[in-house]
Each structure stands twice: as structure tokens, then as C-alpha cells.
Image: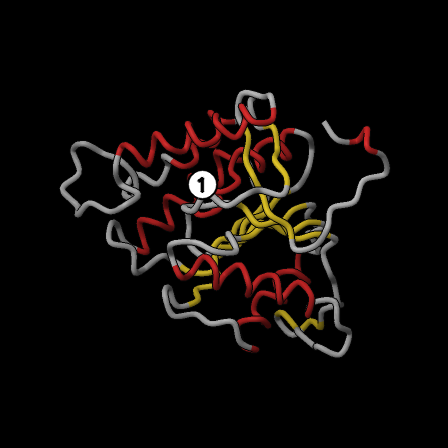
Amino acid sequence: MKLDILAFGAHPDDVELGCGATIAKEIANGKKVGIIDLTKGELGTRGTAETRATESNNAAEILGVSVRENLGLADGFFVNDRQHQLEVIKMIRKYKPELIICNAIDDRHIDHGKGSQLVSDACFLSGLIKIETAIDGDMQKPWRPKQVYHYIQWKNLEPDLVVDVSDFIDVKMKAVLAYKTQFYDATSKEPETPISSKNFTDSIIYRSRDLGRLVGVEYAEGFTVDRYLAVNSLFDLK
């Protein structure tokens, strides 16, 4: 299956939190989008790998993505080495996305920065003809995405570009809240975490609204880039 966008997250729910509204918007515009979760989130304080799997499938259905896979890397302990790069390369070559979206380049959770660099490096390596990979015995052809975007997570990093997601913030929130074990629930008996507070859930909205305010729209999501963005004309910019 050929995809337009392939979004990676170190954990199930990273993609929804970081770029869920952007994905929903692109799907509404006719783009094919897939999600690859690097780990099952098995070290998460709340819930289990099994509940996260169910929640991630529900969130994928809400967003309308074409495919979602989990690489099953070790939560908290995966590294950016040859073995892990090859696993990501296989996914890039399998789906041949035009664009890749992945974790924040720097963040509170160590897996986010690691996942960001792992995917970025794999995007480059995936285009090298002498790196051979195969799935189910079928050799894959090299493929390099045109661009890599990094969504913004816990830290308020300065974005290089923003996307107007005003009409899709409700879809994002519905997908995020599909992770019932992870986020605010006044009746939950599970331990509290930094993302289980009502303040965190509220922050998803007010951060998007503030970013939208800065560019003259209601809601926006921000991204950083690995290389300069290019346009044909200054009038391509809003």
C-alpha cells in the first residue's frame, strides 16, 4: 500500500497528541495516512500494553487512518542502532510515504528524542540502494521520503511551520481521549501521572488555540523540520 503520510510515535498516543488534527485534516483532503508505533507503551504507569493496543485501534478508527502497525520495540530501552534502523526502514519502504511525521526532537520523555532521531536517520538510510531489506522474503526497493516533520510534545519548542487545524480539533480530542487509561478520569483509581491531570487534557486545547492565535486562526499544530522548507513563491505562505 502506497501512503501519502506515515506518522511515527514512540508510544501509542504520541501521534494523536502531536499531530492528530493534522492527520485528520489530510485524510479529509483525500490523503492516505498510516501510523507506526515503535513500542507498545508497556512501561506506562497506567493501563497495560493490551489496553493500549485496544485504545490505539480505536483512535486509529476515529482518525480514519489506512493502516496502523506496532514494531514492538522495547519501551524505554530501544536505541538508535543498525538493528532498529532496519526495522524502521522496512516500514518506510513498505509504505513509500511522501512525507514522514515523527516525535519531537527534544522532550521530557527520553523515548521521544530517541524515536525522533531513529526515524530521521532511517529516512536517509532507506534511500541507499546498498542497504538490503526484505519482508516475508520479498526484497524491498529503496525509498526516501521528500520531507520529515517533527511534531511538538511536552516541551514548548519553537515551530518552523504550523498547520491550521481549526476544523479538526474535535476529531483530535476524540482520538486522544480514546486512550481512556492514560488521561484524566476523575473516577480512576490508578496512580496519577503528568499526563493524567485535567490540566494536561485542557492544555491540548489551549496550546493549540494559542498557537492558532499567533497565526490568525482558531487552532493550529506546530512542527519542526530537518531541513529548510522551500516554496515557489512568497505568496504560497499564508
Seen in the picture, residue 113 relative to 20 is either above or below; the reply is: below
Is 216 in front, or is 122?
A: 216
Q: Amino acid at mark 1?
A: Leu
**Residue 141, image x, y percentages:** 75, 68
Residue lying at the far left of the rendered structure:
189
Give the residue number, with chain letter if any, for mark 1. Answer: 17
**Residue 79, image x, y percentages:** 46, 72
Q: Residue at x 71, y 69 (%)?
A: 140
Q: Residue at x 57, y 78 (%)?
A: 82
Within 10 Å of disc 1 (Cα), the crowding (few <14, some 14-19, many 20+) is many
Q: How is the image coloured?
A: secondary structure
Location of the C terminus (image quadrant) = top right
Is 62 in front, or is 19?
A: 19
Q: How many marks?
A: 1
Left or right: residue 158 versus residue 133 is left
**Residue 151, image x, y percentages:** 54, 46
Left or right: residue 77 versus residue 67 is left
Seen in the picture, residue 132 relative to 93 is either above or below; the reply is: below
Looking at the rendered structure, the secondary structure element under dot 1 is helix
**Residue 153, image x, y percentages:** 45, 46
Q: Residue at x 48, y 30 (%)?
A: 208
Q: Quadrant of residue 216?
A: top right
